[in-house]
Amino acid sequence: MSHPDLLRQTLHTQAESALEGIDAAALVRTGLAAHRRRRHRGVAVCAVLTIALAAAAAIPLTRLARSHPTPAASPPYPTYASPMQWPTRGSLAGDKVAIQALTASYIKVKRVLYIGDGPDPARKYGILLSTSVNDHDLEVVLCTVRDGATQPRRWTCQGPMAPGEGVVSPSAVLLLTGDSARSTQLALAAPGGHITGMSELYATEVDDNGQPSPPANRPTAPVTETADGLVIKAGVGPANVASFAMQVVVKPQTGPPVRVTATQSLSLMDNTGMHAEVYWGWGPDKRLRGLPPLLDNPEQNPGLQVWARLHGLTTSMPGYYSPIWGGTLADGSRAILIQPLTPVRISTAFMVNPPAKGTDDTFLVRDVDNPPDPDTVHQISAYLPLSNGRCELVVVAAPGTTRITYRPTSTSSFTDLSQPQNDGVGRLVVPTCDGHQDAAIQVFAGANRTYEGPIDSTRPNAGPRH
Amino acid sequence: MNREMRADFETYVGARAPTMLRLAYLIEGQRAAAEDLLQTAFVKLYQAWPRIDRSLGADAYLRRIIMTTHASRWRRRSVREVPLAQPPEPPQPQPPPDTAVADRQVLWSALGRLPRMQRAVVILRWYEDLAEAEVARVLGISVGTVKQHNHRALRALRLDPELTAMEQ
């Protein structure tokens, strides 16, 4: 029996064992009845606690708002209805390359609100609005990068891990992220506004009967804006609490101060302490295409079998996601297009086995960084070296591709590669592996041209890697 | 909550409580904890019942509540989970000496040693048969993180010494 079958069977068998001798519906009804009894008892207590919470939270913030000097007036901005209309601010706001690198570091970026200096002078900070979770709700995302390394891939981004941890309001965007012991508080006021007060995290615990404990309202520390309207505080937060929250006082360009609150009511950190890192792949959801030789045995754990067959399965090696394409090249070499999974990032790589030139080791022919949005990838292509010194161009295009054309030099015209078969894979044997810098391909899905540009492995830094 | 909504909720409890108890048991790994989790989750669902769009199905909400409640309870425990060689509460009655049953016991034991989130992803993917995007919504994490957890969990199971010994 294969592992997947055994896994499914085990889970179903164990799940059934949970019901032995138990009336689940009766169990739920008992729980609800107990809840109703507790609720009746707790109404009065909750009311008192709520008043205490409101009073306790308000006093220090008010005190801070009074004591904190009002920052110098900023240039007037128009009134924006939504942060989606805010201009990009920060010391790198005019650096298009840096902005492009930042947006390429996260998925479904809708707006860059800030890029530039922050609390750590050795780093640059970026604040984004994204719709990464459900395509609808805007999320606040905080990215950082070591100063001087503002290329793509270098940025580390962290968005909210649960609803409520990020707030997008016309007055300010807030983010409260990380676990309770290592959280980061971020507040960015609307253009022209300032963050004049920020509570430290205040925590509430809920006892076993569902009653909230009195809030541990912490003294409010003075706020120093790292830039106009921006406050970032890292490494703050109490430990071992059920929920925590922060409140900021925003002084808008015009009008009275506004209070905005973000709450983190749960943490989905796993017990390895791993954050919700951004890993995004082009291939795993696509079905495998290509010729069968590499896939003559059913994959038990997608990707791992191929990895094990090519490298031997060792724990120190990185893993792979499902292969996207597999096939046999003109000299009998076998090639797959696969996504290595490393602790840092996922790339897309062609692998050839056995290698065409020499060693017994399999090597990555090239890798392609994952784009922020996998749907924008229309092709992955490379010149794959053959054992006779020639090369085979392989273009694996997105499912639905109907035509691929190739132009060897900038002065020649595009001609069709072999009619895309196996869902859009075009191939061509060429005499050499070098000197294709001016070559280009076009990819079509019906009448639409979805890609026109160079072959991926002719781009800088692409090439054989042993 | 009006009388109609309450009746609606009662019907839902009768229909779905057993299914959700199975899920809670897989998540918690212990019957007593699973029963607690089920009760807490349904209480939360009851409180949210007037607000949720039941035309979209309440199961998704309940799954999400179960997972977040489990995460919250897990965080609040003063002593965090400790991987054990054997699950503390093996299913009753004891299975007969059968190879398939023994295999399942070994795998169940290995599942218990997975980190919490990896186990949650495996259960939602392989027991509930949810798509990766749906798992991401239930757990409140990105699709990429779901893939990563699933990948790591399967790798951990594959490299688990007891499972390896079983195969040999």
Image (spheres, helix red, strand yellow):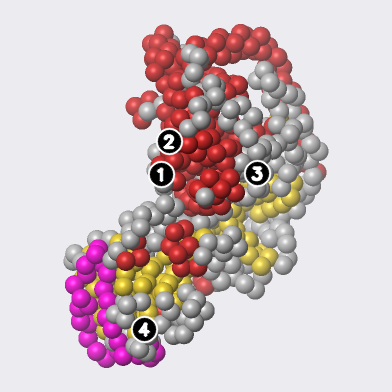
Residue range corresponding to the magenta coloring: A409-435
Where residue A137 appears, as percent x and y from the top left, is 46, 44
Please tell me the numbered disc located at residue B109.
none
Chain on which label 4 sits: A
Question: Residue at point 65% right, 44% down?
Answer: A271
User: To which chain does the residue with label 3 belong?
Assistant: A
Amino acid type at image mark 1: Met
Q: Which residue is mark 1?
A: A1
Which circle's residue, 4 or 2, is located before the other in the chain? 2
The outermost residue toward the front is B97
Position above or below: A359 against A335: below
Quarter of the view holding residue A365: bottom left
- Compute the Cα span from label 4 to label 3: 46 Å
Which of the numbered marks, if any, corresponds to residue A271? 3
Query: Would you say residue A250 is visible in this rendering?
Result: no
Q: Which residue is mark 4?
A: A386
User: Residue type at mark 2?
Assistant: Gln
